[in-house]
Amino acid sequence: MRLKYLLDTNVVSEPALERPSGKVLEKLKEESQSCAIAAPVWHELRYGVLRLPRGKRRTALEAYLSEVVQGSFPILPYDEVAAAWHAGERARLEKLGKTATFVDGQIAAIAFVNGLQVVTDNTKDFRRFKGVGVTSWR
């Protein structure tokens, strides 16, 4: 199956929540073979876990990341092509008086250059990027 979706951090984190959304879990199950994550999302996930104190929760999340996330989804790089697209979008948005977080721009750039749709709970944060499809599975 070919890749269609680039998952944002909040979507990848959903199964690890105390009360995850059944709808999101079902879509992850249905679409897992057509999903990837961006290197900046992998960074956010790892960083979040490493900030936790050692204990059961951190151990469980480390296992989830290594066994489920890393084993299920290709991690796409923020490369030269993505960086160039991102720079153009930052400049365009700045001229319009709009700003986006740097990491959202990186994720959008990876989605754009790979022809993928971003799946996120924060659709408004990604809709400002030209040519990037955005959806929520909620």
Image (tube, rainbow, N blue to C red):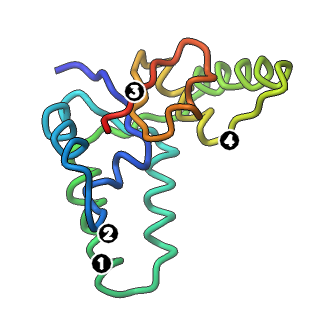
**Nearer the observer, 124 or 99:** 124
In percent of the image, x 21 and y 54: which residue is there? 68
Mark 1 or mark 3, whichever is nearer to me: 3
Q: Quadrant of residue 17?
A: bottom left
Q: Quadrant of the N terminus?
A: top left
Q: For mark 1, give the secondary structure.
A: helix
Amino acid found under the numbered disc labelled 1: Thr
Amino acid found under the numbered disc labelled 2: Glu
Q: Measuring from the top left, give residue 37's x and y in whole percent.
A: 38, 39
Position of residue 9 relative to residue 126, above or below, is below
Mark 4 or mark 1, whichever is nearer to me: 4
Q: Which residue is mark 1?
A: 59
Distance from the alpha carbon under mark 4 to that under mark 1? 30 Å
**Nearer the observer, 67 or 9:** 9
Distance from the alpha carbon under mark 4 to that under mark 2? 26 Å
Left or right of 29: which side holds 60? right
| CB contact under 8 Å: marks 3 and 4 | no
Q: Which residue is mark 4?
A: 101
Distance from the alpha carbon under mark 1 to that under mark 2? 5 Å
Left or right of 51: which side holds 92? right
Mark 3 or mark 4, whichever is nearer to me: 3
Q: Which residue is mark 3?
A: 135
